[in-house]
Image (spheres, rainbow, N blue to C red):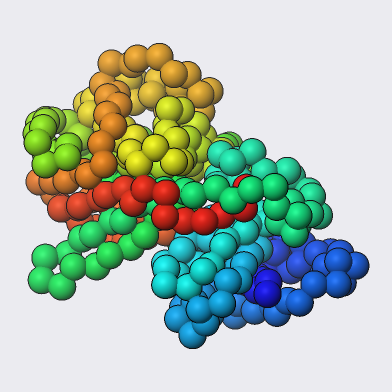
Amino acid sequence: MYYFIVNPKARRGIGQKVWNRLEQEIQKYGIDYEVYITKQPGDARTFTQQLTEESREPHTIIAVGGDGTFNEILNGLSFCSGVTLGYIPAGTGNDLARSLRFPKSPERCLKKILNPKYHSYMDYGILSYGENEPEHRRFLISSGIGLDAAICHKRLEFMKRSGISLLRPGRLGYFLIALIELIRVKPTRGYIVLDGARRIEFNHICTISAHIHPFDCGGVRVAPKASYNDGFLEVRVVHNAHRRDLFSALLDAMLGWKGKRRGVRHYQCRELLIHVERPLPVHTDGESCLFQTDLHLRCVEKKLRMII
Ligand SMILES: Nc1ncnc2c1ncn2[C@@H]1O[C@H](COP(=O)(O)OP(=O)(O)OP(=O)(O)O)[C@@H](O)[C@H]1O
């Protein structure tokens, strides 16, 4: 059985248009399917919870929308059921689809899902935060604190307030917001602990992020070496107080430059602790997790069965 979870509002209504095209195509395949259309944030998570908690039968859940919709599905998933995930990108950033080199055409993505050559087992991350009652959020692409998250928060705020997606082109939008946030950034002291063993202190932290996939922030290759099935988070720390160097780091990320840059460090680990002295914005897959000082992140290896 195939269950489609569709965000009609993804990319300013493109989600609905993509679904209209897909529904005609699906009829030709003559498969058994049900469709769940989201009406508000949180619906994709609830639908997935209901589908995977109630049924133990093998079935396929297909997200039609952007990275935010896929993230909600991931967070609603109960792993007790024999569920396989599929994804048809119809969002703004589409970083997951970019990293997995999905075809641009929704029809071709559908064809791949309905005639799968093989399933892939993918890693995902878990972010935990909060002192008394810790919150846990799964992520598939990345999670981070500081400048990257401030850019995500601003992008969400802007889109919510204006109701338009000026930032839809992704890379250009990211670049403009990033420039503004870069001017406003106030670096802070803190440290990270890799796999509970290696503690590294920084005096001027601007941003720390952990990645499962290379692309982030609407088409920026932030973590070129990240791999989705190695059990590791690729950790990137930008810790330079000089704006000139931050600007270079931003350009590097946009151009996908893999070389070394002063003030940018990359690490690999399965588990990461982050402490910063001042509350900074936090995100998972581009969705806000408010402001925090302490985070715990870990990678869950090859748990997610997906058609790619
Ligand atoms: N019917 C709806 N109306 C308003 N918001 C919705 C609706 N359905 C889902 N959402 C919310 O919209 C958010 C963004 O959707 P989604 O990620 O699919 O598209 P996008 O933001 O255009 O793409 P991307 O995340 O790839 O940049 C989701 O996190 C979800 O909570």
Rendered residue at 55%/48% (across/down): 120
* Residue drawn at 25 percent across, 36 percent down: 269
Residue 203 vs residue 136: left or right? left
Lateral position of residue 211 relative to residue 99, left or right? left
Residue 19 percent location from the top left of the image: 76, 67
Rendered residue at 71%/56% (across/down): 113
Residue nearest the observer in this picture, 162 or 233 = 233
x%, y% of residue 196? 11, 41
Answer with left or right where residue 222 lies relative to residue 113.
Answer: left
Q: Return the x and y of residue 180 as percentages of the image width and height.
A: 41, 39
Q: Residue most toward the right?
A: 28
- Residue 39: percent from left, percent from top: 59, 80
Location of residue 9 by image quarter = bottom right
Closer to the camera, 181 or 226?
Answer: 226
Can residue 167 be seen in the rendering of this structure? Answer: no
Residue 107 in sight from this viewpoint:
yes
Please identify the quadrant where the N terminus is shown. bottom right
Q: Total label count?
A: 0
Residue 142 falls left or right of residue 118: left
Q: Is 24 located above or below residue 32 in the figure?
A: above
Q: Residue at x 58, y 71 (%)?
A: 58
* Quadrant in the rendering for residue 259: top left
Nearer the observer, 297 or 8: 297
